[in-house]
Image: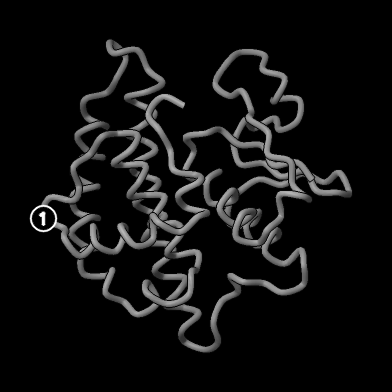
Amino acid sequence: MKLYITPLSPYARLARIVVLEKSLLDRVDIIHAQTRVANSPYYAINPSGRVPYLVRDDGIGMEESTLICADLDQLEGSPAFALPAGDQAWEMLRLEALARSMVDGLTVWGRELRHRPEEERSPTIIEHERQRNERMADVWEKQIENPLMHARLNMAQITMACALQFGSHVLALDWRQGHPKLASWLEVVAKRPSVAATAPTANP
């Protein structure tokens, strides 16, 4: 199989972490895609130009990180990231969605700063996302105490780690100020080999 990614995409990073956690490097080739350029060869593979994009063994391609992570997780017949039973499933989905909301805002902010010339950047969008991130960090300072965020590694935890490290590593945000519980949580999760190996850098 082929997994197309870009190094800074937190969405692609979700899939990369699952590949490592599931020991799938012998089955999945990770390929750096060239996006946001005219006539990239990647567009012939995935016309939307988004990452991650997984081409399965049968040649079928799929995008959207949630779908790709679920597909990779079940490959060996023993899913590690399946939803828990009962009401815990809804709580897990709630936390994952809350973490993804933070990722979404940060990536919009990142596109303004990293992919637009300075004169084309929108101060309104940047300020909106700055305020959103502050609110989300405040919410997560409380939510991070949820037992599911301290249980066995799950997709809510992975998504949150990707959000926080995109903020600090790529956008150089000082979200740790005023959020000691969040900072302490990430310090532990960041040491996990799959998280450490995929940590973004501002200039990959």
Q: Quadrant of residue 78?
A: bottom right
Res. 171 image quadrant: top left
Dot 1: what SS? loop
Q: Residue at x 67, y 72 (%)?
A: 79
- x then y, percent, for residue 182: 24, 61
Left or right of 180, for residue 50? right
Dividing the image into 4 quarters, which one contains the N terminus?
A: top right
- Where, by quadrant of the figure, is residue 149 drawn? bottom left
Count of residue discs: 1
Residue at the spot 61% in from the left edge and 42% down from the top edge: 52
Q: Residue at x 34, y 12 (%)?
A: 117
Disc 1 crowd rating (10 Å Cα; few below 14, some 14-19, many 20+) is: few
Specify how the rendered protein is coloured.
Answer: one colour
Question: What residue is shown with label 1?
Answer: 178
The residue lying furthest to the bottom in this view is: 86
Residue at the left extreme, as displayed: 178
**Amino acid on which disc 1 is placed:** Gly
Q: Is residue 88 left or right of residue 121?
A: right
Question: 106 or 155: which is nearer to us?
Answer: 155
Compared with residue 192, is residue 111 higher up or lower down, i.e. above or below? above
Residue 95 lies left or right of residue 40; in this view the side is left
Which residue of the protein is positioned furthest toward the right in this rendering? 58
**Would residue 93 appear left or right of 108 to someone viewing this image?**
right
Residue located 28% across and 13% down the image = 118
Q: Position of residue 95 (x, y in %)?
A: 39, 68
Locate residue 65, reporting x and y percent: 58, 51
Horizontal and vertical percent position of residue 12: 56, 43
